[in-house]
Image (spheres, rainbow, N blue to C red):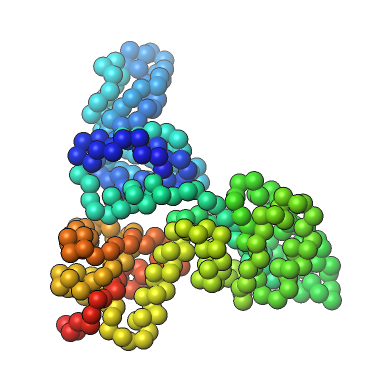
């Protein structure tokens, strides 16, 4: 995300550079905000319904993210535009490299989200976990993981001692080769020696140069999450948001399992800790950040000098946090249970 103008009291202009920036904007723009952008609009005097490029400002009513098309849709009522266009309602379709202006009363989590987006480097990594029967591929960025493909060996049984694995390897390698130019690195992992055998079968030097071998005990979604937990993704993306958030949640769960009394979770308990100044850091699910009581919690945490981390829900660690109520805290000292 590029910041073109920052004035949180008046107008802030940004240029999202990739779909993940658009995803972050979805968590920043909310109903009631004023958003401005260039768009196509029908001329008021045109009998043919002819459209032309215009700059409009909308009072936002609805925001949605089109995952397939990789664009952000912002719907609302036109409050500013050329005199010769019909006012009323309009839908902006924001794509990477479009410039938009935002006028709003900024909430604490929205400023956090904006700052994180400005740091985002746009790295993309393919994760392929496989055994002798199946290969599962996902695309990982700093903010989310998307499942992309599942490739099964023909016949469904073990390849060794039966059907030659070369045809299976060839299909997996072909998929990785087709997508190698769209990613920075490719992690290949899995149990046993299948990953090594696949790597040995790769002939293209460019593809081979992008592959990094890691370890996972299983395939599927569990195997992909295991690669992340073991730090495989973090080694490739040193500032990876997913790896960072996973590490935070796993540290919390580890402390919780110790029953040390130095962590707590749930809105009520975390708010008590924040009010007492006992919370050194709070973790909040992105599903909850727009709730009023969570906004108040974040504002109070800032006032007492505590740290905050918004955890995305589009990966396993985020799902775990949400399952615990969506809010957790690391404590400076033990508190009496209420």
Compared to residue 194, the image places residue 1 above or below, namely above
Q: Which quarter of the figure has residue 196?
A: bottom right
Residue 56 spot, x, y in % from top left: 31, 27
In front of the other: 239 or 124: 239
Residue 9 shown left or right of residue 102 in the figure: left
Image height check: is 337 above or below 248? below
Residue 239 located left or right of residue 109 = right
Observer able to see residue 67: no
* Residue 123, image x, y percentages: 52, 51
Judge whether 320 appears above or below 85 on screen: below
Q: Quadrant of the N terminus?
A: top left
In front of the other: 182 or 314: 182
Q: Position of residue 205 (x, y in %)?
A: 75, 52
Q: In the image, is 181 to the left or to the right of 66?
A: right
Looking at the image, which residue is at 31% across and 32% down? 36
Name the residue: 70% across, 76% down.
192
Residue shown at 84% from the left, 73% from the top: 162
Residue at image coords 44%, 56%: 143
Which image quadrant: the C terminus? bottom left
Locate residue 156: give its quadrant.
bottom right
Is 319 left or right of 206, judged from the image as shown?
Answer: left
Q: Position of residue 202 (x, y in %)?
A: 77, 58
Q: How many marks?
A: 0
Q: Is residue 247 visible?
A: yes
């Amino acid at each position: 995300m590029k910041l073109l103008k920052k004035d949180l009291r008046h107008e802030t202009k940004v240029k999202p550079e990739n779909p993940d920036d658009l995803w972050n904007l979805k968590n920043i723009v909310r109903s009631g905000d004023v958003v401005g952008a260039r768009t196509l609009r029908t001329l008021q005097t045109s009998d043919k319904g002819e459209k032309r490029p215009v700059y409009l400002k909308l009072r936002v009513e609805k925001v949605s993210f089109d995952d397939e098309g990789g664009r952000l849709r912002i719907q609302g009522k036109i409050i500013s535009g050329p005199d010769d266009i019909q006012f009323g309602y309009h839908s902006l379709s924001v794509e990477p490299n479009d410039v938009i202006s935002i006028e709003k009363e900024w909430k604490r989590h929205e400023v956090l989200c904006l700052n994180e987006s400005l740091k985002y480097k746009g790295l993309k990594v393919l994760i392929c976990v496989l055994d002798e029967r199946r290969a599962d591929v996902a695309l990982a960025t700093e903010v989310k993981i998307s499942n992309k493909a599942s490739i099964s060996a023909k016949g469904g049984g073990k390849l060794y001692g039966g059907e030659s694995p070369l045809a299976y390897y060839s299909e997996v390698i072909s998929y990785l080769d087709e997508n190698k130019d769209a990613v920075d690195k490719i992690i290949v992992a899995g149990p046993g020696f299948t990953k090594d055998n696949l790597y040995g079968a790769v002939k293209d030097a460019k593809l081979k140069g992008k592959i990094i071998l890691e370890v996972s005990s299983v395939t599927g979604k569990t195997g992909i999450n295991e690669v992340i937990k073991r730090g495989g993704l973090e080694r490739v993306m040193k500032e990876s948001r997913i790896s960072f958030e996973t590490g935070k949640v796993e540290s919390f769960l580890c402390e919780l399992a110790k029953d040390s009394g130095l962590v707590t979770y749930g809105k009520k308990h975390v708010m008590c800790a924040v009010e007492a100044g006992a919370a050194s850091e709070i973790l909040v699910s992105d599903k909850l950040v727009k709730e009023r009581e969570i906004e108040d919690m974040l504002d109070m945490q800032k006032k007492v000098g505590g740290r905050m981390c918004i955890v995305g829900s589009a990966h396993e660690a985020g799902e775990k946090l949400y399952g615990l109520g969506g809010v957790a805290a690391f404590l400076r000292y033990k508190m009496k249970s209420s």
